Amino acid sequence: MEITTRLEFDAGHRIPDHKSQCRNLHGHRYAIEITLSGDIIQAEHASDNGMVMDFADVKRIARETIVDRWDHAFLVYQGDTAVLDFLNSLPNHKTVVFPTIPTAENMAAEAFKLLKARYQGTFDNHLRLVKVRLYETPNSWTDAFNHA
């Protein structure tokens, strides 16, 4: 059985070597969808009886791990020193430093890595993170899977 939930957040970024507008500082209204698979829990009188995982718990973990950290932050590549220096000059600025350029693909891969560690092994129902879908715009998205 698979379940999916969706959350949204706002963040800024830039793609330093992009040939077009994305090389400039800009932001997006991102949406992230988390898909988990597992057996349906059969535990009479338990709050999550009949579920793969309570959607409230799926969302709480995603908020703690990704959304609260990235929402209203500027996501910057660690090698983009000009922008890093500028952001560091702003008092109390919310900056998230990425080891890779924060493209939608790299963001989805990072979210998958971070979320996988949080979800898998949570329950004894073979819970597994299947996919993270990250929408950069309503019409453009990327999917990150576990290929191992």
Image (tube, rainbow, N blue to C red):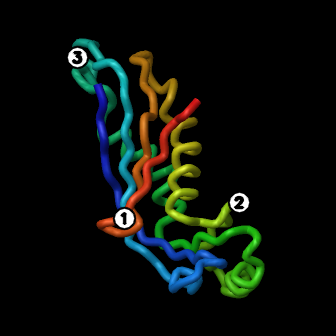
Find out whether the residues at labels 3 and 2 contact each other: C-beta distance under 8 Å.
no
- Regarding mark 3 in the picture, which secondary structure is present there? loop
Amino acid, disc 1: Ser
Mark 3 is surrounded, within 10 Å at the Cα level, by few (under 14), some (14 to 19) or many (20 or more) other residues, namely few
- Regarding mark 1 in the picture, which secondary structure is present there? strand
Amino acid, disc 2: Pro
- Regarding mark 2 in the picture, which secondary structure is present there? loop
Snapshot quadrant of residue 40: top left
Q: Choose the circle earlier in sequence order: 3 or 2.
A: 3
Amino acid, disc 3: His
Q: In this view, does 120 lie to the left or right of 8?
A: right
What's the distance in space between the residues labelled 3 and 2, CA to CA?
45 Å
**Residue designated by label 3:** 45
Residue drawn 55% across and 65% down?
103
Mark 1 is surrounded, within 10 Å at the Cα level, by few (under 14), some (14 to 19) or many (20 or more) other residues, namely few
Residue drawn 23% across and 16% down?
45
